[in-house]
Amino acid sequence: MVRLAPRALALLIAVAAMVPGAALGATPAPRVVVVVGPVGEATGRYLVRGEAAAREAERFTPNVVRVFTPDATWPAVKRAMQGASLVVYLGHGNGWPSQYRNELYPPTQNGFGLNPVAGAGHDAHQYFGEGRIAAEVKLAKNAVVLLHHLCYASGNTEPGLPEGTEDEARQRVDNYAAGFIEAGAAAVIAEGHLSPAWYVRSILSGKRSIEKTWRSSPSANGNTFTFASARSPGFSAAMDPDRPGRGFYRSLVVRSGLLPADVAAGARLTAAIPGAVPAEPTLAGSGLTLAAPYLKGRLLAGNEATLWIPYTVPDGGKLPRLTVGVRWDPIDVAEVPAEPPDASPAEPEDPGASPEPSTEPTAPAQPDPVPSDDPSPAASSEPPAGAPLPPELDDPAEARLSLVEPERLGSVVEPVRVGGGPTRIIVPITLPERPGRYRLVATLHDATGVAYDAATQALLSGVFIQVGGDLGARYLVGETAGATAGEQFELRTAVANVGATTWGHKRIETRPRQVEEAEQATLVAHWVALTPNTDALPPEIRIELPAGMEFGATARVTLAGTAPTAPGQYLLVIDVIDPELGSLAARGIEPGLVRVTVESATS
């Protein structure tokens, strides 16, 4: 008999008391972590599926941890995953190959899309990639990771983007699994459309091998092919597209022969102790003050510029090492219609929503070329293929909705290193590719990219930015004005060129006696009656602008003319006429509009 010292025995009893349902000598319960990241308008649907998976897990283990948006930050997720036997993630995915980078980028790709700051809503997300997962997470032995409704994880891209080749899809599957496998996972399953509750139940209660569980899922298509993992030696990968060569929404990377019993046996005693989530870093109370940020550079679509943030610190203080994330919230930006994804057939309905529960078996999958030591598939207690999911997912209306969310403009936060000096922080930025009006939101992060808390973020204000395109005009004029019928009317205004195209040109002398005279654009204002009247409207007001107005140039003028003779409501519509391009309003540039109230003359 082994005798424990009193202190050791007391410690063991205390640890056992912290483990839900644990007793001395008992097998520790597998830890299940369900993570739901922010996905904008689709967040509600993802939360429903995450909660269903968590409740399904609670039927088999008391050790279930939920990390749901808006509080799914990297510190919270990282802490929860330590020692987990089953990890479920629903949210945005960012993988490679993709159109966003020319090579694999481990800091942000092949991982999670999480809340940058706890409690800040469901719209913005920050990626924490395979590099951080491999370096900062230690899963339980034989852990399984389930990735549901992600872009890239199962070999797909994003709705509206071409899928590319089958070879690219294979690389995405292999890459997305690599960080989790390095953190200790023995299997990574990715499903674009199937909800995770079926897998949670099958893995925690079944006897079939993980591979055969995947092959028999309700979403199986019968188009399975396999290949050896290049990123994770000793692992095999399998994919099951909707049709051969297209629709890559199912994948598996697994160590051959892995059984649900292996997953349960890998649970560690320490894995059952959730522990406290580390406090978010903060600069609140440090005396740091930040002034309103501003931009320097040519504010044209796609251009490089810099964001300047003035700051002060208390005497003797020092600004800590920072990274800054920038995202662009669109305010008035023209939408670009998404192109259909590579002429693929329409996305299938979500089999996880079970629009038509069936007792018929799924189509037989291709023979399994990977050796398996599955002892007795027939004796498995897991639900059969095609069995309906829990009632909360049996929603035909939701089955018609796409469950893979593409990136949205302004949603991604990606911290970058900053420069500056003793009075300002300078952040390199790239302006959005689409012209329009934006709110630029900057977030403060520590040197590792983890966001400071909400109190720190409140030190920094947003800034509104007009991003120009090839053509652009901004009219600096009041929304309303008054005038007296038939009398002289004057309105001070200004117009700025916020596009890349110069209006007119200055005098050009190419060689002696060969001169091209200057050409000027014209500011035009004409009247539009908003109330019925029979009187003729006054002639339009025309003012020549300076020759060769380039991007950023502003002309301040006074519009002077005669007001309409009939009292009533009018619009004064202001436009720029370029000598070569003609009316900017006719080319889609919004004109200036002033609502003018014309009153009767008084004696």
Image (tube, rainbow, N blue to C red):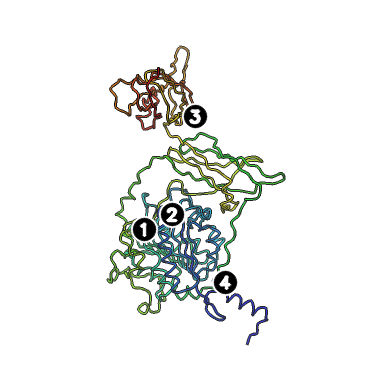
The disc, 3 or 2, on the residue closer to the chain's N-terminal end is: 2
Q: Residue at x 45, y 12 (%)?
A: 513
Q: Where is residue 230 drawn, in percent x and y? A: 46, 61
What amino acid is labelled 4 in the image?
Answer: Thr
What amino acid is labelled 3 in the image?
Answer: Gly
Q: CA distance from mark 2 to mark 1?
A: 21 Å
The disc, 1 or 4, on the residue closer to the chain's N-terminal end is: 1
The disc, 2 or 4, on the residue closer to the chain's N-terminal end is: 2
Residue under label 2, please give it: 39
Q: Where is residue 564 drawn, in percent x and y? A: 35, 21
Residue count near mark 3 (Cα–Cα under 10 Å), binned few <14, some 14–19, many ≥20: some
156 up-or-down from 271: above or below = above
Residue under label 3, please give it: 552
Give the label on residue 534, or none. Answer: none
What amino acid is labelled 2 in the image?
Answer: Val
Q: Residue at x 58, y 64 (%)?
A: 276
* Secondary structure beneath label 2: loop
Q: CA distance from mark 2 to mark 4?
A: 32 Å
The disc, 4 or 3, on the residue closer to the chain's N-terminal end is: 4
Q: Residue at x 29, y 63 (%)?
A: 355
Q: CA distance from mark 4 to mark 3?
A: 61 Å
What amino acid is labelled 1 in the image?
Answer: Phe
Residue under label 1, please give it: 248
* Secondary structure beneath label 4: helix
The disc, 2 or 1, on the residue closer to the chain's N-terminal end is: 2
Residue under label 4, please give it: 270
Q: Residue at x 38, y 79 (%)?
A: 376
Q: Nearer the viewer, residue 334 or 122?
A: 122
333 up-or-down from 527: above or below = below
299 up-or-down from 355: above or below = above
